[in-house]
Every structure is written in C-alpha cells, then in structure tokens.
Image (spheres, helix red, strand yellow):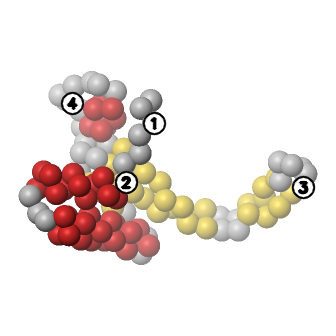
Amino acid sequence: MAGNTVTRADLCEAVYQKVGLSRTESSELVELVLHEISSCLERGETVKLSSFGSFVVRSKGERIGRNPKTGKEVPISPRRVMVFKPSNILKAQINGETTEGVSED
C-alpha cells in the first residue's frame, strides 16, 4: 500500500492541470460536484457513477450492542449509513486486470 491520501486540494490541482480551468474555477468545480453528491445522499438518493461505483444510503434499525470494555449491553439508535459499492470495472482496474468483458454492475 502506498499510504497516500488524495485531498480536495489534490483533486482541484488535477482538474487545473488536465482540464485547463483556472485554479479558482477548478476548486469551484470540485466543490460543486462534491456538494451535489452530498445533497443527493442527504435526500436518500443513490448516486451511481458509471464505471466507478455507487453511493447508497441505507437505514439501520435500532439494535442492542455491547460495550467491549465493560460488557454492558447498550441500545444503538436507528440511523442512516452510507455505503460505497465499487463497479466491477473499478475492481478490475484496482487488481490490474483487463476490463474486457467486465460488466458495469
């Protein structure tokens, strides 16, 4: 593992380098895309990016958990969680496989 982390600033710089927008415009574009994705997820919508993957919001019901330190049972309140499901194409790319015949699921 390389251990590198890509930040918003890195994404803005990549857009600046590859698209040719100004640094300010690149930053605004990245922020706009991230805000739109966040807004859709907040409304409970699924965000599917072809050849990349899907962000899905799931509802989890209330359940009983256990405090690992004390062993005492504690209720865990219902909540919504976000899950990312990578596409088969992205999985293949990560594993260095060819993407011929790989579906976009």
Identify residue for label 2: 7
Query: How many angstroms separate mark 4 from mark 2 (CA)?
Result: 27 Å
Identify residue for label 1: 3
Q: Tag 2 or tag 3, which sits nearer the N-term?
A: 2
Q: Tag 4 or tag 1, which sits nearer the N-term?
A: 1
Q: Which mark is residue 99?
A: 4
Q: Tag 2 or tag 4, which sits nearer the N-term?
A: 2
Query: How many angstroms separate mark 2 from mark 1 (CA)?
Result: 13 Å
Q: Tag 1 or tag 3, which sits nearer the N-term?
A: 1
Describe residue 22's horizontal placement relative to residue 65 as left or right: left
Query: How many angstroms separate mark 3 from mark 1 (CA)?
Result: 36 Å
Identify residue for label 3: 72
Q: Residue at x 20, y 69 (%)?
A: 24
Give whichever of 14, 85 is nearer the camera: 14
> Which percent across, then down, holds residue 99?
21, 30
Q: Disc 1 marks which amino acid?
A: Gly
Query: How many angstroms separate mark 4 from mark 3 (CA)?
Result: 49 Å
Front label number (1 vs 4): 1
Q: From what the image shows, is residue 63 above or below residue 50?
A: below
Q: Disc 3 marks which amino acid?
A: Lys
Q: Residue at x 22, y 25 (%)?
A: 98
Please tell me how crowded label 1 is: few (under 14), some (14-19), or many (20+) other residues with Cα within 10 Å. few
Give whichever of 30, 100 is nearer the camera: 30
Q: Disc 2 marks which amino acid?
A: Thr
